[in-house]
Amino acid sequence: MSAPVENPAPPQATADAGARRAPLAFIIDEESNIRQFVSLILQGSGIDTIEFIDGASFREVPIARAPDLVFLNVNLEVQDAVQSIEVLSKSGFTGSVQVVSNRGSAVLDTVKQAGEQLKLHMLPVLKKPFETSAIQKIVSGLKLGHGLPASGVKVSLAEALKNNWVEFWYQPKVDLRRKQLAGAEAFARVCHPQHGIIKPRTFIPDADDASLLTLAERALVSALKSGLNLSRFGVNLRIAINVPVKSLVKLPVGEIVRAHRPKVDDWAGLMIDVTEDQIVPEMMLADELSKRFAEHNVRLAIDDFGKAYAALMKLKKLPFAEMKLDRSLVVGCSTDKVHAPICKTMIDLAHSFGALAVGVGLEKASDTMAMVSMGCDLGQGFLFGQPMPEERFIALLKQRVTVRAPAPPSAAVAEAALQGV
């Protein structure tokens, strides 16, 4: 969502964090896909970013606001990284430097030692390629942004709802063909006053039916209000929420939509995701709900789609607007000779029923390109952005709308898809 800069204006935060400014990170790397990857993870963790296409670009710009963290790539010219470290030292930089590279440990240690001699806080070197978890661990260790979700903490959904600890974070959904933002999905998070952010796997499995119904209602209202906030600056997105089938049959969807939907003519509507294992045995119910919701511009999507595709091939129609391929099949689909043909079959099946196919869990450009070649319509995953608080999601969208720089010609497919995000 941030754009690489060659001769940028003095660095400013990419989003307004209110009274307290968000932490800021510089990313200095010649590889555009790495810059975007790191930037998206940091932004999703509540950290603003500014990207530089190389060390020279960084050194040419006066540091108007000191960053809290600098990701510094070490290329073939080791002296280039050392010069950037010297500039940071002279500016009085007090943050942390994360050296990254695919070069040998001896070279990286040389750069790290150069920074230590200049009294900079140098983090342990990070070898390329690295996973999302490596960046999240760095953020957590430095206590920047949201950091890593709390682990080993038991909080009931009922308690979280009672104390208003539940909030909804939004993850971008990208049109893989048009290379632009196509929607967003809401995910519940518990923001605990002592333990920080807690993910659904901690509080959903043991939740009682009453709490799940309350959560579903709040998710629906939150998505409608977020749609209204987005429409105020000209962005109309179809937002998806996840609802168990047991809750969905009791949820007064029509009443809630009428009360809270954005009053705009081109409202994109809502998507309600139901898991394959819950909805496939209830296809008559799915058809009934689909017809009931349609008059309110609410559609159904089947989530975790994969195991039942053979059974669904025998049906004449399906009441789903989207069919979201199971993450376990999408991850590694560019090389997996078993999963790849299954993904292709499921994408074709979705199209045969007039539904859109969605690839979930995209973290690698190679898997994204494989999805594109198979004809997949939409994509979700850390490659395009991880779930983030609503205010941050909206602020970054505003930034993208008002300040849009052209992407370099050599940008990867996944990076190009972000031009509209």
Image (tube, rainbow, N blue to C red):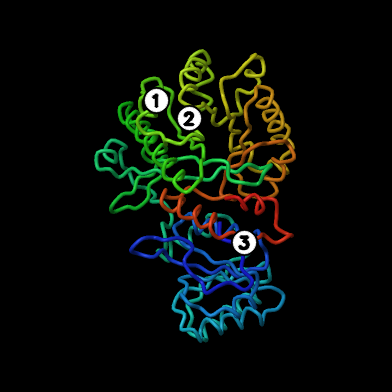
Seen in the picture, residue 104 relative to 340 is either above or below; the reply is below
Report the number of numbered marks. Answer: 3
Image position, residue 225 (x, y; %): 39, 40
Secondary structure, mark 2, is strand
Q: Residue furthest left?
A: 162
Q: What residue type is labelled 2?
A: Ile
Question: Along the polypeptide, which appears first: circle 3 or circle 1?
Answer: 1
Q: Residue furthest front?
A: 265
Q: Which residue is drawn at 60% across and 58% down?
A: 36
Image position, residue 152 (x, y; %): 37, 47
| Numbered disc in front, either 3 or 1 | 3
Q: What residue type is labelled 3?
A: Ala
Give residue 272's mark.
2
| Numbered disc in front, either 3 or 2 | 3
Quadrant the N terminus occupies: bottom right
Q: What residue type is labelled 1?
A: Val
Q: Give the CA distance from mark 2 to mark 1.
A: 10 Å
Residue pointed to by mark 3: 405
Q: Give the CA distance from mark 3 to mark 2.
A: 34 Å
| Numbered disc in front, either 2 or 1 | 1
Question: Along the polypeptide, which appears first: circle 3 or circle 2?
Answer: 2
Q: Which quadrant holds residue 107?
A: bottom right
Secondary structure, mark 1, is helix
Image position, residue 347 (x, y; %): 68, 30
Residue pointed to by mark 1: 253
Secondary structure, mark 3, is loop
Nearest the viewer among 108 and 77 is 77
